[in-house]
Amino acid sequence: MVSLELILARNLVSTLHLAAVLLDETQTIVFYNPPAAALMGTNFEDTGPIPVESWRDTYGPLGPGGERIPAERLPITSVLRRGEPGHATVRLQIPGRGPSDFEVSGLPLVGEGGYSGALVVFWKAGS
């Protein structure tokens, strides 16, 4: 079941001109907006939710040697799960463009039932 926090956040994300994704508590991408779709190379309507294993295998994040880094090892992930906002610079693999560094900021979505996911915005580093 999708939490009320994710439903409300989807309305907000739909209005942003900044690439944004919504993650549920399992780190499944449950929605992304058109600016994120332009970077990802596909629309949410075509993919639907993307499990963590799939988005990690496709987009990264990547370490300095190009190896995939488990999302759980990113400092921003643990901060968000503690209910705190976070920011990091990460290298992502963009289909058809190769790896690029992105600034990533996240806000935890916390309701009466506790942590229910995160709203994550990202933009190319140096932009």
Image: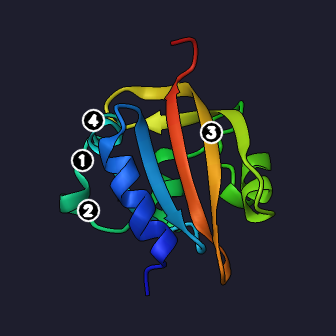
Q: Which residue is mark 4?
A: 38
- Specify the color scheme: rainbow
Residue in front for this viewpoint, 57 or 122: 122
Residue 58 appears at what percent x and percent y? 44, 51
Q: Amino acid at mark 2?
A: Thr
Q: Amino acid at mark 3?
A: Ser
Q: Which residue is mark 3?
A: 105
| Residue density around tag 1, few if under 14, some if 14–19, many if 20 or more, within 10 Å | few
Residue 39 appears at what percent x and percent y? 34, 34
Q: CA distance from mark 3 to mark 1?
A: 22 Å
Q: Which residue is mark 1?
A: 42
Q: CA distance from mark 1 to mark 2?
A: 7 Å
Mark found first going from the N terminus, 1 or 2: 1
Q: Amino acid at mark 1?
A: Thr
Residue in front for this viewpoint, 82 or 12: 12
- The image shows residue 97, relative to residue 15, as above or below, that is above
Q: Residue at x 51, y 69 (%)?
A: 5
What's the mark number on residue 13? none
Residue lying furthest top in this view? Answer: 126
- Image quadrant occupied by the N terminus: bottom left
- The image shows residue 41, relative to residue 124, as above or below, that is below
Q: Are marks 4 and 2 in contact (CB under 8 Å)?
A: no
What's the mark number on residue 47? 2
24 lies left or right of 35: right
Q: CA distance from mark 1 to mark 4?
A: 7 Å
| Residue density around tag 2, few if under 14, some if 14–19, many if 20 or more, within 10 Å | few
Q: CA distance from mark 2 to mark 3?
A: 23 Å
Mark found first going from the N terminus, 2 or 3: 2
Q: CA distance from mark 4 to mark 2?
A: 13 Å
